[in-house]
């Protein structure tokens, strides 16, 4: 049975909500075990790693959060030893954020854990189905980034640390 466009959009919305709830529950568990790495802090840590030394104000602009909200997360990351602040060589009044070796290790651990979880969840999917799902989600994310002026999510995780 072919669904109407409205019904199909509603089904997609329902599935996205299910994904969001599951992600939120998993993030809450992570937050209980590692308070420095709530989902926003994890996002900021990855952004600092992929973009190289970066100003906190630039991160706030890129993620669309207030500077104080980003500053709180950065302080937690620094307190956990995952991020370090260094003077900007081009502007002595400003600081740049970099990921520490411990931060790089933590990102690798989270990435490995996430990849293992996805692998476990998709065992019943064929390779073609996985490719189709990835392509469709990529288009969806690109559309969301363009229309909602959100952070760029197309960029793969490429560490500046090796």
Image (spheres, grey):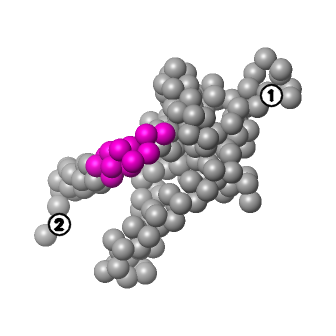
Where residue 94 appears, as percent x and y from the top left, is: 75, 21
In the rendered image, which residue does mark 1 sit on? 88
Q: Is residue 117 found left or right of 97 in the rendered image?
A: left
Can you tell which of label 1 and label 2 is closer to the viewer?
Answer: 1
Near mark 1 (Cα within 10 A), the count class, few <14, some 14-19 or many ≥20, is some
Label 2: which secondary element: loop
Residue lying at 58% horizontally and 60% vertically, measured from the top left: 108
Magenta segment: 24-36
Where residue 139 appears, as percent x and y from the top left, is: 46, 56
Where residue 80 appears, as percent x and y from the top left, is: 56, 39
Quadrant of the image for the C terminus? Answer: bottom right
Q: Main secondary structure of the magenta part?
A: helix
Residue 60 within the segment the image draws in magenta: no
Using the image, determine if residue 103 lies above or below residue 116. above
- Residue extending furthest left? 1
Q: Work out whether residue 127 or residue 96 is closer to the camera in this orientation and state it.
A: 96
- Residue extending furthest right? 90
Q: Is residue 78 found left or right of 112 in the rendered image?
A: right
Residue lying at 63% horizontally and 50% vertically, measured from the top left: 102
How many numbered marks have been drawn onto this rendered protein structure?
Answer: 2
Quadrant of the image for the N terminus? Answer: bottom left
In the rendered image, which residue does mark 2 sit on? 2
Upstream in the sequence, badge 1 or badge 2?
2
Label 1: which secondary element: strand
Residue lying at 42% horizontally and 53% vertically, measured from the top left: 140
As measured in the structure, the alpha-carbon distance from the residue carrying label 1 to the one carrying label 2 is 58 Å
Q: Work out whether residue 99 or residue 128 is closer to the camera in this orientation and state it.
A: 99
Where residue 64 appears, as percent x and y from the top left, is: 50, 29
């Amino acid at each position: 049975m072919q669904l109407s466009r409205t019904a199909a959009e509603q089904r997609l919305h329902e599935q996205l909500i299910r994904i969001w709830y599951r992600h939120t529950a998993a993030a809450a568990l992570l937050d209980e075990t590692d308070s420095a790495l709530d989902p926003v802090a994890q996002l900021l840590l990855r952004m600092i790693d992929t973009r190289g030394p970066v100003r906190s104000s630039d991160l706030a602009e890129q993620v669309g959060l207030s500077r104080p909200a980003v500053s709180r997360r950065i302080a937690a990351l620094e307190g956990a030893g995952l991020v370090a602040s260094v003077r900007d060589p081009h502007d002595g009044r400003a600081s740049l954020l970099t990921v520490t070796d411990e931060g790089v290790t933590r990102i690798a651990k989270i990435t490995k854990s996430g990849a293992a979880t996805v692998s476990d969840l998709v065992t019943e999917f064929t390779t073609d189905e996985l490719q189709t799902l990835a392509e469709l989600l990529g288009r969806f994310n690109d559309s969301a980034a363009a229309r909602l002026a959100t952070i760029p999510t197309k960029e793969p995780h490429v560490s500046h640390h090796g």
